Image: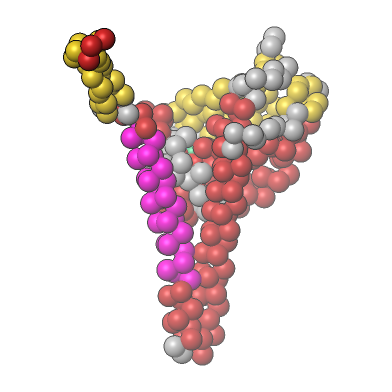
Amino acid sequence: LEVTGAPIFSEGRKWKGVVLVFHDISELKHLEQMRKDFVANVSHELKTPITSIRGFSETLLDGAMKDEQMLEQFLQIILKESGRLQSLIQDLLELSKLEREDFLLNIEKVDVQRLLHDLLPIVEQHAEQKGVQLQASVEGETIIRGDSSRLKQVFMNLLANAINYSRDHGDVSLTFREKEETVMISISDNGVGIPEDEVPRIFERFYRVDKARSRNSGGTGLGLAIVKHIVEAHHGNIHVESVVDQGTTFHVEIPKKFTEN
Ligand code: ADP
């Protein structure tokens, strides 16, 4: 709480009273704290792969590269860690674009089922590597107004998560439903699930239930923050049902007509 005050005088310069202004700055303080946390998180996320890239390069230069097996193994690590840096920077740039006040969607006619259908071959390989069965029921044609490349990003992220947080030989399904004014796309997995008290937090930047699992699968911790931004920019909503050790479903609902703000 910030307080400023000023005396009031009546005619004849007689002191009459005082005005006190109470300013609630808790919201500002909160925003400032969030900004600080974000900078700290980004720095930490950047530092980890850089430390590893430096460490392995130095070890190689100190002589380890004479051993061919080590050379290959360390170069693989360096490649993986630099890939991680690249994804992180890409996601950060994307988030900062989405958060700009003058950010606009590129609204056009989108056939949602075709869009979903076209994503399947892209995630299929990822699913196969994990031995995950991917099932999709997206036949038909439903035209809505939206930003097709941003909507693709939403479903790619959710499908990638469903596969990453599946158990080996799990099942992932993608379903489409048309409602009167909206379309509803659901992505389900029978994987690790999310503890109930952590569900509201998974859309926060860098929040992860299991840090090691997320990093191992190449996750940046920013995917769902990006997803939520895009869905809300379409005036849609996203909600999660999850049971630990049983699985998770993300439902995304998007209005068919796009309304300008
Ligand atoms: P990440 O890059 O870590 O996957 P996200 O923002 O996409 O970042 O997701 C945040 C966290 O939410 C993940 O680290 C994971 O703990 C949890 N999560 C997301 N999707 C799922 C899912 N389908 N099943 C279980 N947990 C999930």
Span of residues in magenta = 29-53
Residue 164 percent coordinates (x, y): 53, 45
Residue 35 relative to residue 217: left or right: left
Identify which residue, 62 or 244, lies in the foreground.
Answer: 62
User: Compared with residue 44, is residue 15 higher up or lower down, i.e. above or below?
Assistant: above
- Can residue 96 be seen from the camera position used here? yes
Left or right side of 64 for 93: right
Q: Nearer the viewer, residue 117 or 199?
A: 199
Q: Viewer-proximal residue, 196 or 61?
A: 61
Q: Is residue 19 magenta?
A: no
| Quadrant into which the C terminus falls | top right
Residue drawn at the location 37% of the way across and 46% of the way down: 36
Image quarter where the N terminus lies is: top left
Magenta stretch: helix, strand or loop mostly:
helix
68 shown above or below 127: below
Q: Position of residue 41 (x, y in %)?
A: 40, 50
Quarter of the view holding residue 145: top right
Who's the residue at 53% across and 58% down the image? 84
**Residue at 46% of width from left, 59% of height from top?**
46
Which residue is rendered at x = 58% and y = 26% of the image?
Answer: 232
- Residue 14, image x and y in percent? 19, 13
Q: Measured along the vertical axis of the image, is residue 258 above or below residue 192? A: above
Instruction: Say if residue 157 shows up in the picture.
Output: no
